Image: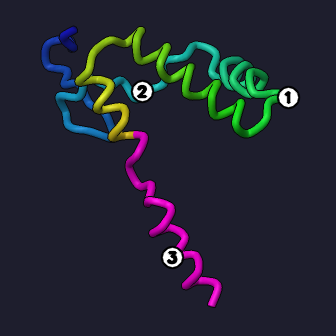
Amino acid sequence: MTAHALPGTPLVSPLSSPLSLLNTQPNIPTPDDFYQELVDMHRDLSAQQSALVNAKLILLLANHVGDLAVLREAMRAARQDIAPEAQAGGAHEAECR
């Protein structure tokens, strides 16, 4: 899969380089409807079941995307600014003292 832009229009993502393959611009025609359906999908599930549903959804969408470069970029973007729990917990403990 190759990303294309109109001549003179660079592909730009606020989370990555100008030649980004990942579209981070709003792209869902009815985002509120999507969000509600996402919330509804988790209704009446335990935390473990909810995590399993999320994992299954991620794998289904990753398969649909099918481009490893785009998936890597999405994983980097999702992980950006998220500290590992051990580091985050240590910072929280220091704040509580």
Residue 25: mark in rendering:
2
Residue visible at 23% across and 24% down?
69
In the image, 29 versus 56, the foreground residue is: 56
Q: Position of residue 87 (x, y in %)?
A: 45, 69
In the image, 97 versus 52, the foreground residue is: 52
Q: Is residue 88 left or right of residue 24?
A: right
Q: Position of residue 19 (x, y in %)?
A: 17, 28
Say which residue label 3 marks: 90
Q: Is residue 28 above or below residue 74?
A: above
In the image, 84 versus 34, the foreground residue is: 84
Residue 44: mark in rendering:
1
Is the residue under label 3 in contact with that under label 1 (CB below 8 Å)? no
Q: CA distance from mark 1 to mark 3?
A: 33 Å
Q: Position of residue 22 (x, y in %)?
A: 32, 25
Of pointers 3 and 2, the one earlier in the residue sequence = 2
Residue extent of the magenta highlight: 78-97
Q: Quadrant of residue 72?
A: top left
Determine the secondary structure under disc 1: loop
Of pointers 2 and 1, the one earlier in the residue sequence = 2
Of pointers 1 and 3, the one earlier in the residue sequence = 1
Residue visible at 56% across and 20% down?
57
Q: Is residue 26 left or right of residue 29?
A: left
Q: Is residue 88 left or right of residue 74?
A: right
Residue visible at 40% across and 29% down?
24
Q: Is residue 77 above or below residue 36?
A: below
Amino acid type assigned to the residue bearing label 1 in the image: Asp
Amino acid type assigned to the residue bearing label 2 in the image: Gln
Q: CA distance from mark 3 to mark 2?
A: 34 Å
Q: Is residue 67 above or below residue 79?
A: above
Mark 1 residue crowding within 10 angstroms, few (<14) / some (14–19) / many (20+): few
Q: Quadrant of residue 97?
A: bottom right
